[in-house]
Amino acid sequence: MREHDGKNLSWSDRLRVLPEADPPRDAWPAIRARLEKRRRRPVAWPGLALAASVILAVSLWIWQGPESPPPAGGTPWLAQSQELEQELRRLRNSGGVMNGGEAALVAELEDRITVIDMQLAGGELSESEAEKLWRRRVALLAELVAVRSDRVAVVEADNYVL
Amino acid sequence: MGTHDHLKLDDATLAAARGGDMNACEAIYRRFERPVYNVALRLCTDADEAMDVLQNTFLKAFERLDQFRGDSPFWPWLKRVAVTQSLMKLRRERLHRLWPGQWLESEAVEDGPGGETADLEGALARLPATTRAVVWLYDVEGYSHAEIAELMGKTESFSKSRLARGHARLREWLEPEEEDATCVSMMERT
């Protein structure tokens, strides 16, 4: 039974009658454009492991030769990526079994990272485009670390209780 | 039962959208854009973030339409996508506030956006993001504590405690006289 606030109206009753808002703009044109672009894109490689995609991304940098500078802004983002991946490997070994929600979230994040790695490996990016993709990659990895960390915290808390 | 659970999607439109018919996809978008936007807005409180969630929700939904079993209502399935996208957005925003160098989410209760709390709308927006999410998902969208725990990667105890905390804060902000009376009454009894 939903909690009452003492005025014979539950919080549920009061919250449900809050007014709704209309979206400030029509998102359909942008959604349609991305759906159509997606359909023109080659099929993504299923099951591309995160480690393999890092190798691809690293290879992009190395191809520029030992004397060439790495992609502008690429070095710090690459270093952060590698740190996060190390943290992820550690967390994968210490966390328990994920529930459905976590697994879906992790799958979503890994999908997005795979797409970014494919774009990075594509090799036809301007410096600013590559930097944007690297920043996005680092942000997604950080999010993956957060999800895994939460799972480890739950496992540790459960173990403590037991 | 949550709000908008009465919204239906006919089999023909669903089948056409699965087949890649853009007109059918648009029909689905038009039918559900407002409820999706409002779920996102209540969880994220920011209109621009809610628009991002709206867009990502439909992109994800159209990508995974083949995973939707047509024997159950469409809106709860779509709503779950919207909720997941909103929670991811909230998590990302918290990480950005901790950046740089801090990979882990802080467990400290964050201060929600400042503003008028004299009305329920303002008070809800002022709740910390996670607490607000639990309150909205439980009280309005009709999720159980078990479902909320699964969505957020937390335990049922977490969901229950955040709900209680959220209700306590709302009561404190909206009915301070009653809160005071309750405190006085409790003190007189001791």
Image (cartoon, rainbow, N blue to C red):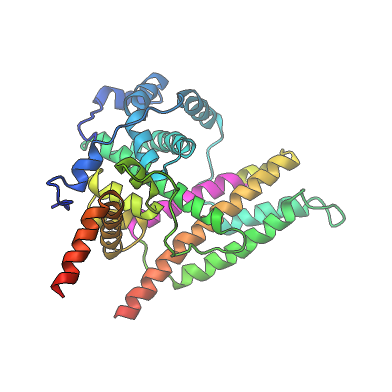
The answer to whether one can see residue B92 in this image is: yes
Of residues A60 and B53, the one drawn nearer to the viewer in this rendering: B53
Which quadrant holds the N terminus of chain B? top left
Of residues B62 and B119, the one drawn nearer to the viewer in this rendering: B119
Above or below residue B39? Residue A49 is below
Above or below residue A133? Residue A146 is below
Q: Position of residue B185 (x, y in %)?
A: 16, 65
Of residues B169 and B129, the one drawn nearer to the viewer in this rendering: B169
Which residue is found at the position 50% from the left and 51% from the top? B92
Which quadrant holds the C terminus of chain B? bottom left
The answer to whether one can see residue A49 in this image is: no
Q: Position of residue B62 (x, y in %)?
A: 40, 33
Q: Quadrant of residue A125?
A: top right
Range covered by the magenta-colored residues:
A99-117
Q: Position of residue B101 (x, y in %)?
A: 61, 63
Q: Position of residue B103 (x, y in %)?
A: 55, 63
Above or below residue A96? Residue A48 is above
Looking at the image, residue A82 sits to the left or right of residue B64; the answer is right
